[in-house]
Image (cartoon, rainbow, N blue to C red):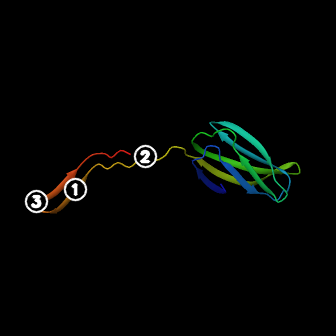
Amino acid sequence: MGQTIITKDNTPTLTGLTPMIGEEVYISYTENGKPYAFTTMADSTGKWTYTFSSPLDDGSYGVLVQVQNGRAFQTIDTIALTVDTVPPAQPVITGATDAVGAGYRADYAGQFDR
């Protein structure tokens, strides 16, 4: 894989550059065993952009970016894309102990809520 992208956006936008100015760029990937393919156009500088129109499930995807060079397809990039929309768990304090000296001790066990 060329690049690794990790995102919390399930409709990410991919951008790139191709030497094939003004040509179609082919983007393909597989989700849950089903292949998908889309096209976008490279502009007059070779820049292309593609935004996934349907939300992707959380998980990892191998994205292949190609251009057509005559009759053959030429791979211009491969992307390891990971979508992770689940936020990490909130931290929980499970206890605290302070022993500053004999006779001075405070213990606390519990949970703080936001």
Q: Position of residue 66 (x, y in %)?
A: 77, 50
Q: Position of residue 43 (x, y in %)?
A: 83, 55
The residue lying toward the viewer, choosing from 6 and 87, is 87
Disc on res. 103: 3
Residue 114 occupies quadrant: top left
Single out the mark in the foreground, 3 or 1: 3
Which residue reaches farthest left?
A: 103
| 76 up-or-down from 53: above or below | below
Label 3, secondary structure: give it.
loop
Label 2, secondary structure: give it.
loop
Q: Residue at 59% of width from left, 50% of height from top?
A: 7
Q: Residue at 22% of width from left, 56% of height from top?
A: 97
Q: Residue at 64% of width from left, 36% of height from top?
A: 33
Label 1, secondary structure: give it.
strand
How far is mark 2 from mark 3, CA to CA?
A: 37 Å
Q: Position of residue 55 (x, y in %)?
A: 64, 39
Q: Earlier in the sequence, mark 1 or mark 2?
A: 2
Disc on res. 97: 1
Query: Badge 2 is on which residue?
Result: 89
Q: Neighbour class for label 3 at 10 Å: few (<14), some, many (≥20)?
A: few
Q: Amino acid at mark 2?
A: Ala
How far is mark 3 from mark 1, CA to CA?
A: 13 Å
Disc on res. 111: none
Q: How many numbered marks appear?
A: 3
Q: Neighbour class for label 1 at 10 Å: few (<14), some, many (≥20)?
A: few
Q: Earlier in the sequence, mark 2 or mark 3?
A: 2
The residue lying toward the viewer, choosing from 95 and 79, is 95
**In the shown orientation, is residue 81 left or right of residue 15?**
left
